[in-house]
Image (spheres, rainbow, N blue to C red):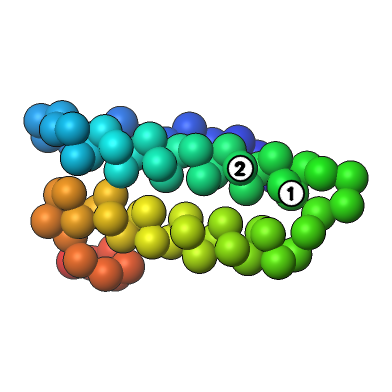
């Protein structure tokens, strides 16, 4: 799995944006680590993916975006 850096935040940085971004980045690192394991655990990976989606939505909400539609 390729480790792609997260985009820089747009607009002024706030503590909420930083917390949401940090949580998202940590979950991405966790996901990469679990995929790279000798014996990946599917249940753990699924759990991380669920948390990652929630973190992504929370991060987008700090910019006033709701949902997962790129045409918002």
Mark 2 residue crowding within 10 angstroms, few (<14) / some (14–19) / many (20+)? some
Image quadrant containing the N terminus: top right
Residue picked out by circle 2: 30
Question: In the picture, residue 40 is in which quadrant?
Answer: bottom right
The image's mark for residue 27 is none
Residue picked out by circle 1: 35
Q: Secondary structure at mark 2?
A: helix
Residue 38: x, y in percent? 89, 45
- Determine the residue positioned at 14% across, 33% down: 14
Residue 65: x, y in percent? 17, 60
- Residue 6 shown left or right of residue 14 in the figure: right
Image quadrant containing the C terminus: bottom left
Q: Tag 1 or tag 2, which sits nearer the N-term?
A: 2
- Residue 59 shown left or right of residue 39 in the figure: left
Q: Is residue 57 above or below residue 8?
A: below
Mark 1 residue crowding within 10 angstroms, few (<14) / some (14–19) / many (20+)? some
Q: Secondary structure at mark 1?
A: helix
- Residue 30 shown left or right of residue 55 in the figure: right
How many numbered marks have been drawn onto this rendered protein structure?
A: 2
- Determine the residue positioned at 72% across, 47% down: 34
Q: CA distance from mark 2 to mark 1?
A: 9 Å
**Nearer mark to the viewer, of 2 and 1:** 2
Q: Residue furthest right?
A: 38
């Amino acid at each position: 799995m390729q480790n792609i850096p997260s985009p820089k935040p747009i607009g002024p940085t706030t503590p909420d944006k930083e917390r949401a971004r940090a949580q998202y980045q940590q979950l991405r690192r966790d996901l990469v680590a679990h995929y790279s394991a000798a014996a990946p655990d599917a249940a753990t990976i699924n759990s991380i993916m669920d948390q990652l989606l929630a973190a992504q939505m929370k991060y987008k909400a700090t910019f006033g975006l709701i949902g997962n539609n790129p045409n918002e």
